[in-house]
Image (tube, rainbow, N blue to C red):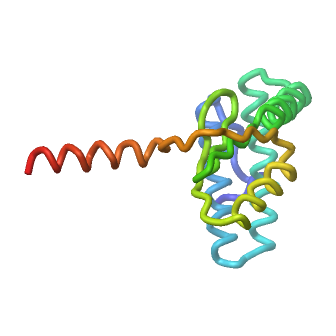
Amino acid sequence: MASLHRQSSPTTSREALGRVLESARFALESFDADQLMTTQISLEDTLIRVLVAMNSLNIQPELAMQRALSRLQEGHAQGTFHIYVDRVEIQAQGEIRGEWPLYSQSDYEAALRLAHELGCTVVHEDSCQLGLFQHVRLHQGKATAHSA
């Protein structure tokens, strides 16, 4: 990868964004090869390229940082752990972002600890609902049973 200071300035925003991607990809490859110093240098180059790309799009870095931090805090505060008898669902902004089964009391306690650590609210649900993927499997099973 050509060093940051040897390349000419990008002529388009697309080219600037492409250079960000290229630099980040190189950082990941360096990291995978356990070349930590090269990874650090590449990440620093990537940061500069992000700033150049933001400038080409007329984005002010300070304001962008404030907006990004605000979104992280809002999304974090809106997370909810819905704990059912058989599973946990994580919901954020009205969407299910993840779920896993509960097999034991220790699984339940781990879910409560995780919700607390992430600053999420906990809602205990009374019913034993089927999750999205269990619902699909159930219907697939019925379809194959009727077709047999």
Q: Is residue 75 above or below residue 107?
A: above
Q: Residue at x 73, y 53 (%)?
A: 6
Q: Residue at x 86, y 34 (%)?
A: 73
Q: Position of residue 78 (x, y in %)?
A: 78, 32
Front-lying residue, 138 or 62: 138
Q: Of all residues shown, which one is farthest toward the front?
A: 126
Front-lying residue, 5 or 99: 99
Tell me the quarter of the picture where residue 70 sits: top right
Q: Residue at x 23, y 45 (%)?
A: 142
Q: Is residue 14 above or below residue 138?
A: above
Total marks placed: 0
Tell me the quarter of the picture where residue 71 sits: top right
Front-lying residue, 74 or 37: 74
Q: Of all residues shown, which one is farthest toward the bottom?
A: 34
Q: Position of residue 88 (x, y in %)?
A: 64, 49
**Image-based side of 97 in relation to 75, left or right:** left
Q: Residue at x 81, y 45 (%)?
A: 48
